[in-house]
Structure formats: C-alpha cells, structure tokens
C-alpha cells in the first residue's frame, strides 16, 4: 500500500529535491556535503532524491535557505559559472577566512547569504 503525501509534504519534498539538485549540480557537492549543509546524512539525501522519504522540518528550512542563496548568486553572477565557481572557492574574511563552499557545507548558509547581499550592494568583505 502506497502512502499518499499531503500537499504540504509533497511541496516540501519537491523543494528539498530541488535544493539537492542545485547543491549537486551547481555547487558540485557530494551527498555527504549536501547532507551536512541540510543537517542530514548522505543516506537521507539519497532517499530524498529518489522520493523514498520525506525530509525533516529542519532540512526543509535549510533547503529553503539554500535555494534563496541560489537566487542571490544568480542575481550577482548571472550565467557566469566560471566567476561563480572562482568566488565559491575563494577565502572570504567575513566567513572566518573559509570559502563560501565550506561555509555552506558547515550549515552556515545565512552567513554566505549575508556576504552575497553585501557584495551585491557594493560592499566587499
């Protein structure tokens, strides 16, 4: 017997799958790194990708933030994937000299969002 998801759970699952795709395809994260960013295990990420389980509420919130970050990065870098990748791998003082990628994996998506917002406004940190 197949379990039917509520519209809300279905939307949350789709949102998390979209965030997982973004992290895997654009940021080139492994399932382990995606899991770390979303506060879950690599096994959970694989299950979400195949729609076998629904994500925990904290993963949904983290996925929303990751997708918000993807929008912000799109606004700043547009289609310049090379510039985006260079920035993601560059140490940023405002992130404790970590790269944005490391900050995302550490679950500090809000910190990266702040840096991107400041960069977009002309403030470089």
Image (spheres, rainbow, N blue to C red):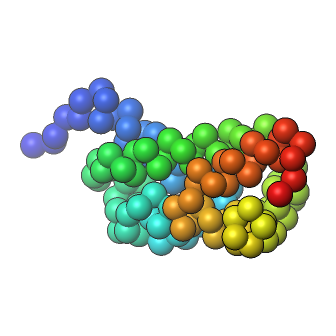
- Residue at the image position 41 percent from the left and 61 percent from the top: 39
| Residue 53 in the image, given as x and y percentages of width and height | 28, 52
Q: Is residue 18 visible to the viewer in this orientation of the structure?
A: no
Of residue 58 and residue 5, the one placed in the foreground of this image is 58
Quarter-of-image position of residue 14: top left
Of residue 106 and residue 26, the one placed in the foreground of this image is 106
- Residue at the image position 67 percent from the left and 60 percent from the top: 27
Q: Is residue 2 visible to the viewer in this orientation of the structure?
A: yes
Q: From the image, which quarter does the C terminus lie in?
A: bottom right
Instruction: Using residue 100 as the reference point, say whether residue 30 is left or right of it.
Output: left
| Residue 61 in the image, given as x and y percentages of width and height | 43, 44
Of residue 121 and residue 65, the one placed in the foreground of this image is 121
| Residue 22 in the image, given as x and y percentages of width and height | 60, 51
| Residue 55 in the image, given as x and y percentages of width and height | 33, 50
Height in image: 34 above or below 21? below
- Residue at the image position 61 percent from the left and 40 percent from the top: 68
Q: From the image, which quarter does the N terminus lie in?
A: top left
């Amino acid at each position: 017997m197949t379990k039917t998801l509520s519209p809300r759970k279905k939307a949350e699952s789709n949102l998390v799958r979209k965030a997982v795709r973004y992290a895997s395809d654009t940021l080139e994260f492994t399932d382990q790194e995606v899991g770390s960013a979303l506060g879950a295990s690599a096994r959970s990420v694989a299950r979400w990708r195949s729609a076998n389980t629904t994500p925990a509420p904290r993963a949904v919130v983290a996925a929303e933030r990751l997708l918000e970050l993807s929008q912000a990065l799109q606004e700043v870098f547009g289609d310049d994937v090379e510039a985006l990748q260079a920035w993601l791998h560059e140490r940023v003082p405002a992130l404790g000299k970590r790269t944005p990628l490391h900050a995302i994996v550490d679950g500090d998506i809000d910190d990266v969002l702040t840096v991107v917002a400041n960069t977009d406004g002309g403030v470089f940190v």
